[in-house]
Image (cartoon, rainbow, N blue to C red):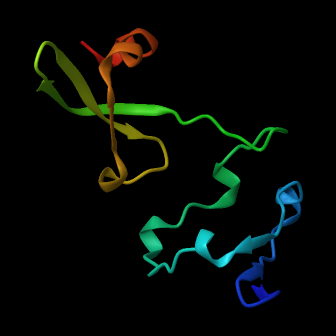
Amino acid sequence: MQEVGQVANRLELPPEMSLAHPVFHVSMLKMVVGYPSLIIPVETIEVNEEFTYDEILVAILDRQVRKLRNKEIASVKMLWRNKQVEEATWEAEGGKKRKYPHLFV
């Protein structure tokens, strides 16, 4: 990483990430305390030409229903491929049930 100014840094990106702009404002970067078990090799992530990738759902870990005044909203805790259990996300159940019916048995 190279400082470009007081609030910008240039990252050294691998050739396969040449489409990404290498200069970032310091507010976009986070200090990370490294844990070797959390490092994901770049080879395991497939990136398409639009520089996006699809998350693959592995499992539903938990379910909860929040009661509002006039309705109930069901949420599920989802575990994604290449993520740790601590990084699982809570998302609305509705659309996910149609997309991943095999996990809602």
Q: Residue 68: x percent and y percent?
A: 13, 23
Give the camera-side residue of 45 and 52. Answer: 52
- Please tell me whether residue 12 is drawn above or below residue 84 in the rendered image: below
Find residue 71 and report its image quarter.
Answer: top left
Judge from the rendering whether residue 86 lies leftward or rightward of residue 34; answer left or right. Answer: left
Find residue 35 and report its image quarter.
Answer: bottom left
Find residue 26 and report its image quarter.
Answer: bottom right
Residue occupying the point 61% across, 69% down:
28
Q: Residue 22: x percent and y percent?
A: 82, 69
Q: Residue 42: x percent and y percent?
A: 68, 59
- Please tell me whether residue 42 is drawn above or below residue 25 in the rendered image: above
- Please tell me whether residue 75 is drawn above or below residue 12 in the rendered image: above
Badge count = 0
Residue occupying the point 34% across, 14% down:
94
Q: Residue 52: x percent and y percent?
A: 71, 41
Judge from the rendering whether residue 8 lies leftward or rightward of residue 59; answer left or right. Answer: right
Residue occupying the point 44% across, 81% down:
33
